[in-house]
Image (cartoon, rainbow, N blue to C red):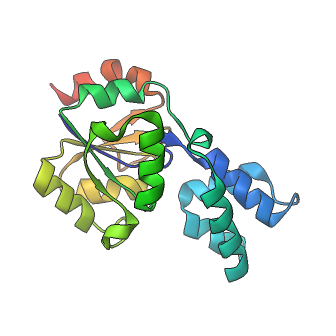
Amino acid sequence: MNILWDFDGTLFDTYPAYTRVLSQVLGDEADKQEIYDKLKVSFSHAIEFYNISAEQVEEIERLKKELSPVDMEPFAGVEEVLKFADRNVIMTHKDREGVLAILDHYGWTPYFADIITIDDGFPRKPHPAAYNHLHTKNRVDLAIGDRDLDLLPAKELGIATCMFQGKSEVADYHLEDFNDFFDKVLPLLIR
């Protein structure tokens, strides 16, 4: 089985760290749960919702660069799924340097046959170009993400989709915990 992964919020629990960064820039009056919820839609959605200025965006980017890979823990059970897969690939809007720093920190770089980041010049999700490129090279069987945005391109290409920690009409499968992958998703995929 070949799996296409989203990065933030799917492989790694990055949203709490990003929420702290935005909260620091926005000040104490901004509700942290609301910030988290807006970030889960997308970073650009949060920027627009809070009417964040260009200067604040620069400060957010500076603070994000100061985050350590230890601030971005992998989700429980995900490594077992990575080991199980024949081939893993990533499509993310995160920059390559940031992705590799986190993967290297956890020793996970060898799990991935291909990685497309924002640096590769593909249109942003939900445009299917990057997914099509990865699928053509790697024959992807399943795409896993935490937002509809991550699943729509796969769905357009006829790839099975799995929503992690959320509900979605786009998803073929739903998973709250990767420890349940082998009991709740895999049997459905191989029938």
The answer to whether residue 117 is seen in the rendering is yes
Q: What x and y, as percent, mark residue 121?
A: 32, 73
Looking at the rendered structure, the number of numbered marks drawn on it comes to 0
- Is residue 38 in sight in this rendering? no
User: Which residue corresponds to the image point at 37% horizontal and 36% vertical from the top-left?
Assistant: 108
> Quadrant of residue 180 in the image?
top left
Question: Residue 63's spot in the image, x, y percent?
Answer: 68, 61
In this rendered view, identify the residue nearer to me: 85 or 151: 85
**Image height check: is 141 above or below 75?**
below
Q: Furthest-bottom residue in view?
A: 54
In front of the other: 179 or 90: 90
Q: Using residue 180 as the reference point, say whether residue 110 is left or right of it.
A: left
Q: Quadrant of residue 61?
A: bottom right
Q: Residue furthest top?
A: 183
Please state, as top left, top right, bottom left or bottom right, where the N terminus lies in the image: top left
Picture residue at 35% right of the left edge, 50% below the top: 170
Q: In the image, what residue occupies the spot 29% across and 60% down?
A: 153
Task: Report the front residue among 176 and 53.
Answer: 53
| Quadrant in the rendering for residue 110 | top left
Q: Quadrant of the C terminus?
A: top left
- Left or right? Give the position of 160 relative to 41: left
Furthest residue in direction right, as rendered: 29
Residue at left 40%, top 34%? 107
Residue 75 sits above or below residue 153 on the image: above
Give the image location of residue 137, x and y in percent.
12, 54
The x and y percentages for residue 185 are: 31, 27
